[in-house]
Image (cartoon, rainbow, N blue to C red):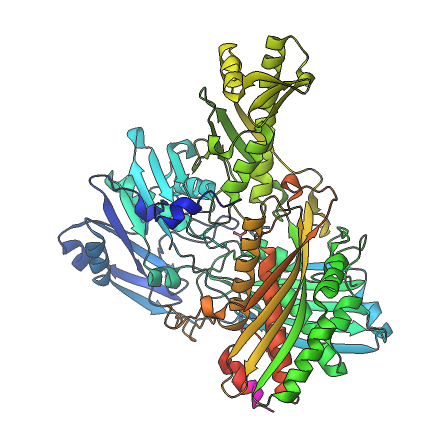
């Protein structure tokens, strides 16, 4: 079934923050942000800005009534810089004016004298200088030290992965409205309404119950609005608090690209050891995470890097250490995969290095080491059977051996075009790695006309979660989907929400919805049973008709609803869900952190133009572990989008900061993202249907983040194509593999 938002999307009628009709007296905000990456603020001169007609208020750190602090995990990030700036783009002054144009004109008149301090952009340099956000962490399985002597092959190497701009189509934005008695309502384009509420309360020094955050939907989030939407929501709330007028700020694209953090770049070292049978016996890895200037979500991202350091493989001896390194870049943040893709790239690079040295396809090593049911991940949880199941189904369906022969034939017949193939297994743990975050609530009302209104903590950001929640409710009540309305996400209706993130939103909020609906249904059935003088177990609702002992009655859904109301029985329910069985002990780095894993395998085929260095992807052929998909259209859409976004990260998207920490790729003219022409010519997705029970909603496994990681295969497919042209090419494991890098490798040593 279609996404319930598709109708208003196609007609241009969906409401985003910038579409909300403006209240009279609305002011517009703009930020003056730091032009230097590290420095001491000597003075800020706002006098010229204040003189401009239409400027209502110029706000600096000293105007903040509460704490000047927006750090969630670590309190290390000011809303407005007070004494020091730590990255280019760090907000210093907030201007509010009668129009957007006036606000931005005023910003240009602000002058700050900043004494420059040394700038660090490289995470290894930060680590050398002791600039760590949190102490390093190490995950271990058995003992790598003892294992090396049993290895016939040992290889070491270094990898780099770059950041990635979220490029949600809707930029960051918020609109705050003053309410009575000092309360403030904030419309925010956020994945985390509660984070915005909590932080606004902290900065304004008012209780959380005074702040109502409301989110109808986002034009994309991808993690970029898990934590960093808070900044703009709080700025609008602050300006509203100080002026008692509505304040709106929707960022221009270049402001957004300059001031917000991105996917974390990582630099990593690996050492891998195998025996003659190509079993990986030992793996050691160090991750240097480029956290940027403040913690933001970096500690949690770093944790997921460690969780996924062995991807879909079982390695009996593992030692993985991660450093979260403070640099003078905008604080990097959540991005689809949340540190997982970064560590999966390293193990794939390690395997590729072995394969290239031994002159055999990486697939041979990959297949031999797939994690089997009952094998232990380095963090103690045991694997299920889907890693080999997906791999073998991929082989059976798509026949990579035959594809490889065709590619070899093509390569020997073509001088200037070469093809390459890579396989990419994925394995992604589903749950927030911070166990307490795995909880959700739903509020369901059945109205007397038979219509149903549902509120949950889930934020719709294009991923289709509202459609899935509506399906859950329609299924339980057995009513037409048209009866169901999913309301905006609102902190006054649903409290203390976790952000919509970690691929877990439909599971957590869907299960809370399921519980609330079941409770209402139970009460309705009792009412019907009393009316018909039978036991409640005799009552069934099927497609809006009431059945008693499998006999159709003349009662329908609406009549049952009205009867329940007249009997003064509640047609509303607020339910709470938390997944059972998950735990993690960070003192020993062991536990069972994930409700389950989502698995899959992809074959990626690339064609390189060896005169130009440009490339295309012929095909991505996937077997994906959907569990039992509750909505194939949405789930396939998530796979296709994830694959393209993953390929973008690995190939063409190149974030460039200069040595002074200034973003050079600050617009779409200098930062290339995949467009329709760079989508693979073929994307085939086969569903691995499993009948096993699991903790996913209706057994439909989480699908938001995992497919992005198929994109990693694109990097290795390109590498193989380059090697077909220039077998002597020595190619650093340095993603993204841009056309420029491909060209250099084609003609390099
Ligand atoms: N956000 C978060 C996430 O706070 N914790 C997580 O474990 C996570 N995982 C993936 C994406 N976002
Ligand atoms: Mo996310 S990276 O699930 O906000």
| Relative side of 69 to 179, left or right | right
Which of 730/41 is in front? Answer: 730
Locate the C terminus by quadrant: bottom right
Residue 588 lies, in percent from the top left, at 73, 51
Which of 182/634 is in front? Answer: 634
Q: Is residue 286 magenta?
A: no
**Residue 107 vertical placement versus 518 (above, below):** below
| Relative side of 415 to 397, left or right | left
**Residue 743 vertical placement versus 37 (above, below):** below
Residue 634 lies, in percent from the top left, at 54, 49
Query: Which residue is painted at 63% across and 88% down in the image?
Result: 413
Residue 317 lies, in percent from the top left, at 79, 64
Query: Which residue is painted at 35% across and 55% down in the image?
Result: 82
Which of 337/409 is in front? Answer: 409
Total numbered labels placed on residues in the image: 0
Viewer can see residue 325: no
Main secondary structure of the magenta stretch: loop
Query: Which residue is painted at 71% across and 71% down in the image?
Result: 400
Which portion, as a residue range, is magenta? 745-749
Residue 340 lies, in percent from the top left, at 61, 59
Query: Which residue is painted at 51% across and 41% down in the image?
Result: 467
Viewer can see residue 632: yes
**Residue 709 vertical placement versus 523 (above, below):** below
């Amino acid at each position: 079934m279609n996404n319930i938002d598709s109708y208003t999307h196609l007609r241009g009628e969906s409401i985003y923050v910038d579409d909300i009709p403006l209240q009279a007296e609305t002011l517009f905000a703009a930020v003056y942000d730091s032009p230097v990456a590290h420095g001491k603020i000597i003075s800020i001169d706002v006098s010229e800005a204040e003189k401009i007609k239409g400027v209502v208020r110029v706000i600096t750190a000293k105007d903040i009534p509460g704490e000047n602090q927006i750090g969630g995990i670590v309190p290390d990030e000011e809303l407005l810089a007070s004494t020091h700036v730590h990255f280019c783009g760090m907000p210093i002054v907030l201007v509010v004016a009668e129009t957007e144009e006036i606000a931005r004109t005023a910003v240009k008149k602000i002058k700050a004298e900043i004494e420059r301090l040394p700038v660090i952009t490289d995470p290894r340099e930060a680590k050398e200088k002791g600039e760590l956000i949190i102490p390093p962490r190490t995950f271990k399985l058995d003992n790598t030290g003892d294992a090396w002597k049993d290895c016939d092959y040992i290889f070491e190497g270094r990898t780099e992965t770059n950041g990635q701009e979220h490029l949600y189509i809707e930029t960051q934005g918020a609109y705050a409205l003053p309410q009575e008695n000092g309360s403030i309502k904030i419309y925010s384009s956020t994945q985390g309404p509660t984070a915005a509420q909590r932080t606004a309360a902290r900065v304004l020094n008012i209780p959380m119950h005074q702040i109502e955050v409301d989110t109808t939907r986002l034009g994309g989030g991808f993690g970029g609005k898990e934590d960093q939407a808070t900044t703009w929501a709080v700025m609008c709330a602050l300006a509203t608090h100080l002026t008692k007028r509505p304040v709106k700020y929707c960022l221009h694209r270049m402001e957004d690209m300059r001031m917000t953090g991105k996917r974390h770049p990582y630099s990593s070292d690996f050492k891998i050891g195998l025996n003659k049978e190509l079993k990986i016996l030992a793996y050691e890895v160090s991750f240097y995470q480029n956290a940027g200037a403040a913690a933001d979500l970096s500690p949690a991202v770093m944790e997921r890097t460690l969780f996924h350091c062995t991807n879909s493989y079982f390695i009996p001896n593992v030692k993985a250490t991660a450093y979260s390194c403070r640099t003078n870049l905008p604080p990097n943040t959540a991005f689809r995969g949340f540190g997982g893709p970064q560590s999966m790239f390293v193990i794939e690079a390690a395997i590729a290095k072995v394969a290239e040295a031994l002159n055999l396809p990486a697939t041979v090593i990959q297949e031999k080491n797939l994690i089997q049911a009952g094998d232990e991940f380095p963090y103690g949880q045991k694997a299920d059977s889907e890693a080999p199941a997906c791999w073998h189904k991929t082989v059976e369906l798509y026949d990579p051996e035959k594809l490889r022969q065709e590619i070899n034939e093509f390569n020997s017949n073509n001088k200037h075009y070469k093809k390459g193939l890579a396989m990419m297994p994925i394995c992604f743990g589903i749950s927030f790695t911070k166990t307490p975050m795995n909880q959700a609530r739903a509020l369901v009302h059945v109205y007397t006309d038979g219509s149903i209104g549902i509120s949950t903590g889930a934020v719709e950001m294009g991923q289709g979660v509202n459609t899935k929640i509506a399906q859950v409710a329609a299924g339980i009540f057995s009513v037409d989907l048209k009866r169901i309305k999913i309301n905006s996400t609102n902190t006054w209706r649903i409290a203390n929400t976790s952000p919509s993130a970690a691929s877990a939103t439909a599971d957590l909020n869907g299960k809370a919805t399921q519980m609330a609906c079941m409770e209402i249904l139970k009460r309705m059935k009792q009412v019907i049973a009393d009316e018909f003088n039978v036991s409640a177990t005799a009552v069934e609702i099927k497609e809006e008709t009431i059945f008693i002992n499998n006999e159709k009655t003349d009662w329908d859904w609406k009549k049952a609803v009205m009867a329940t109301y007249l009997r003064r029985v509640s047609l509303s329910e607020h339910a709470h869900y938390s997944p059972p069985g998950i735990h993690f002990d960070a003192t020993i780095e062991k536990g069972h952190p994930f409700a389950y894993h989502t698995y899959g395998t992809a074959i990626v085929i690339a064609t390189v133009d060896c005169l130009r260095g440009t490339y295309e992807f012929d095909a991505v052929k996937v077997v994906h572990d959907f569990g039992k998909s509750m909505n194939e259209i949405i789930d396939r859409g998530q796979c296709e989008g994830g694959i393209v976004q993953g390929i973008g990260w690995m190939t063409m998207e190149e974030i460039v900061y200069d040595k002074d920490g200034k973003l050079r790729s600050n617009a779409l003219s200098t930062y290339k993202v995949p467009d329709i022409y760079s989508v693979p010519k073929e994307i085939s997705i086969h569903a691995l249907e499993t009948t096993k029970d699991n903790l996913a909603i209706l057994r439909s496994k989480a699908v938001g983040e995992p497919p992005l990681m198929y994109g990693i295969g694109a990097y290795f497919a390109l590498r193989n194509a380059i090697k077909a042209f220039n077998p002597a090419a020595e190619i650093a494991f340095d993603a993204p593999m841009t056309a420029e890098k491909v060209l250099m490798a084609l003609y390099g040593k």
